[in-house]
Every structure is written in C-alpha cells, then in structure tokens.
Amino acid sequence: MNISLEKQPKCLAELKAEVPADLANKERQSVLKAFIREARIPGFRPGKAPKSIIEKHHGEAINNELEERLINAAIQEAIKKHDDLKIINIKTPENVTHAADGTFSFNAGLVLSPEFSLPEYKGLEIEVPKAEITDEIIDQNLDQLRQRFADYSDVEDRAIEEGDLVVIDYTSTIDGKPLDEVAGEQAKTLAANEGYWIRIEEEAFFPGFTDALIGAKPGEEKEISVTLPNDFPLAEIREKDALFHVSVKQIKHETLPELDDEFAEKINPGKTLEDLKTLIRDDLERRQKSQLEEYKVQAVIAKLVESVEFELPEEILQAETQGQADQIVQEASQSGASDDEMTDQQDEIKEEATARATTNLKSNFLLQEIADAEKLQITNQELMQRLTLMAKQAKEPTKKYIKQLQRNGQINNVRQNMILAKAVDLLVDNASITEIEPTEDENAQ
C-alpha cells in the first residue's frame, strides 16, 4: 500500500493513498463473500446465488462497502506509519478512483492536533487575593441582616437630608420623548416608576440625582437633568441627557434592630449573637474558599496558555468561536440587551468570542498533553461516582441516565473531561502561589 502524507499550515495535512490491485481485489472478494452469505435473492437459497446475480442486484452496495474498507485500511496504515501525528478529524475522501488495472486510490484531508513543545507546567507563578474574613466583614454582613429586619416610619417635619430613605414617583424623557419610546420596552422601568425607594447617597441611581433631592419635602416636585453614563446598558441612550420629573412622596426613618441575642434568635431560632457571627464566618469562609479555588484554576490556565504559542486547527477554532458568540448573545439577551444593541456590537462580540475560543482550545490541547505526559487516568470507580452525581443533579435514575449517555456516545467525553480536570488539579497543586491584598471588588464578594 502506497501512503504519503504532506503537512500543511493551520494543522492540516493531505493524505494520498494507493491500494495495489491485488489487495483491492482480495478485499473485493471478501466483501462479495459476505454479500453472498447474507443476500436474499428470489429463487435462490441463502448463500447459493451466483456471484454475477449478487453483483447485479447489490453492485452499488458492494462498491460502497469495498471503498469504505479500503479507505479505513489506508487511514489505519497512515496512522501506523506516522505515529507521531495526532489526527483529530478525517475529511470526506476525494478523487476516489478505481483504475482500469484494479488499483484503488483516494485523497483525504486530515485535521491534526497542534504541534508544540510542552512548557514547564509545574511551579507556575500565580497571584491570588489573600483569604481573610475580618471582623469588619462580619459586621458588614450583620448590618445587611439588620436592614432586612428594619422598621420604617414617616418623617414629616423636615426636608430630605443626606442618608435618608425617600419614596418617589418619577417619569423621564429624552428630547421631550418618553424614555421607553426612545430606547424601547427594556427602558420601561427607567421611563416611569411609582413608589420607588431610594437612599440619598452619591452612588445611588445616576450621578447628581440624589443631590438634587436634598432639601425637598414630601409633596414637592423636582425637575432633575442627568447625563446617562457612557457604559449604560442601553446603547441607544448612552451619554444622552435625560430629564426626570420627580414627585417626592415620603421620607422614611429607618430603625435598625438592636444587635443582640434577641435579634440572633429572630434570624436563627435557638442561636445567640455569637452563634450567629460564627455561622456567618463559616458561610463566608466556605464561599471564599470556593471562589479562591476557582481563582487559582483560572490563574494557572491563563499562565499556561500565555507560556506557549501555537497554531490552532482553523475549522475547530471557527466552530468554537461560533459557539462562544452564541453564548455571548444569549447572555446579553438574558441581561436585557436588544437585538439592535447586539447588531451594533457585532465586532466586539466576535472579538470576545474569538478570544474565549482561542483560550479554551489552547488550554484543552495543553491540558491533554500534560495528562498524557503524567499518564493521568480515570478509574471505572471514579467514572461511576461522577456519573452517579450527574444523574442525581439531573434528577434521573442512575441506570437510565447512564444508558442515555451511552446511546449518545457521551461516556468517553465525561471520562475525558475528568482527565483534564485532573490535569488542572495537578497544575494548581504544583503552582507557586503568592497572596496579595484583595481589591475592593474582591473584598465586596
């Protein structure tokens, strides 16, 4: 069998195969014998019909089976001959030819796994926010609980002051048009609202809005002009001037419950204040630990991906990019973005989708190579435990769930994902980790 393979850019290769006439004919006789055994021809007992009759009735099927066998045999021969290549996909064969002398030949495009030298992956240096639950954080959480159980009474003898809670009605316009007429249905709540509670502090609502309410009394009306920020979710009205017509309904006095054992009992029956603090600390530590582990995973993968450059298979990258773009659009739609907004942001969506897809594919190829180098495996017991958990999460009987995965050919995908997860764990366990002071955003979490 004459096999040649020519590598091409972007993880492609061209396979050319030629099967000698004697081998092709031998395989044809094997196919023909199988058809003679199985074929049902009127007037003949099974297995007794002449070859000529079988070829007349099933000629096309015989040729198809023969071609499939010869092509598979040639590809397997190519894989043995070029065992250093990792073939991801085999394209539909082309130039399939049966020569007059019986020689069979074809070409097939191959998609190959990227070639790269595995970088040093143990001891990756990453920085993670310092994990610490301070008394201040505990107090902040207690204050949030107190606000949930606060009592509110009307204030009638004074004007609005900084820090007050105020109930207002409002409508808004841009260039004299109702805001929802300008920006669509998704701006409806911003266009008009009744009984809206707002705390008089700078970061509430839009810059300058609450300042304009200071000094007003219940029953008064105010016209407040604000410039919508340049990162406002609705692109149609970013950086536009909006005019709010505000009617002050009430000023509310907030009375927080005392921070004592009675309050703790109300939150969690049978618990003291110290018990409640302990419960809050334990919960925060669990959440922080989970966030920290996720942070480490993202950090080591990012460090690994940036440590080496290599080409990615173009077709696979395109498919992954499209999948990421679909996901971004779905996320934006769920967050309230309109079709027009997403159309306006097509370039940004494509750029983000390409970046995500590139990172995902590079990390997968690298992690697979690490798993091979470390000979990472998943035992049948580990696989069964994982499948049992997946069935429980899906609220399906375990046996039924596993059979469904088997029918869909997904068991191997589950095993492969588990192997990659082990590779990630290896990276994290061997990383060189430096703790840094968390940012304000990280503290807020």
Image (spheres, rainbow, N blue to C red):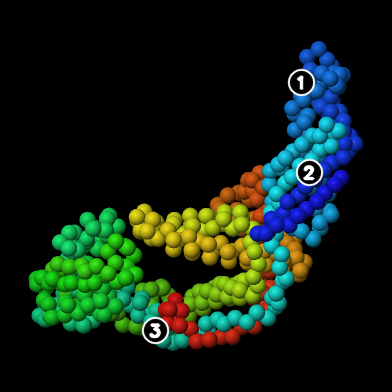
Residue 416 image point, x, y percent: 68, 59
- Residue at which label 2 appears: 72
Q: Quadrant of residue 424?
A: bottom right
- Residue at which label 1 appears: 57
CA distance for labels 2 and 3: 69 Å
Q: With respect to residue 105, does 243 lie above or below?
A: below
- Residue at which label 3 appears: 139
In this picture, residue 173 sits left or right of residue 5: left
Q: With respect to residue 412, does 275 lie above or below?
A: below
- The type of residue carrying mark 3 is Asp
Task: Find numbered disc 1 in the image and state the secondary structure of the residue it sits on.
Answer: helix
Question: Of the residues under marks 1 and 3, which one precedes in the sequence?
Answer: 1
Quarter holding the N terminus is top right
Task: Find numbered disc 2 in the image and state the secondary structure of the residue it sits on.
Answer: helix
Residue 374 image point, x, y percent: 76, 69
Question: Of the residues under marks 2 and 1, which one precedes in the sequence?
Answer: 1
- The type of residue carrying mark 2 is Asn
In this picture, residue 5 sits left or right of residue 408: right
Pointer 1 local density, CA inside 10 Å: few below 14, some 14–19, many at least 20: few
Residue name at image x 58 percent, y 49 percent: 396
Residue name at image x 73 percent, y 51 percent: 14
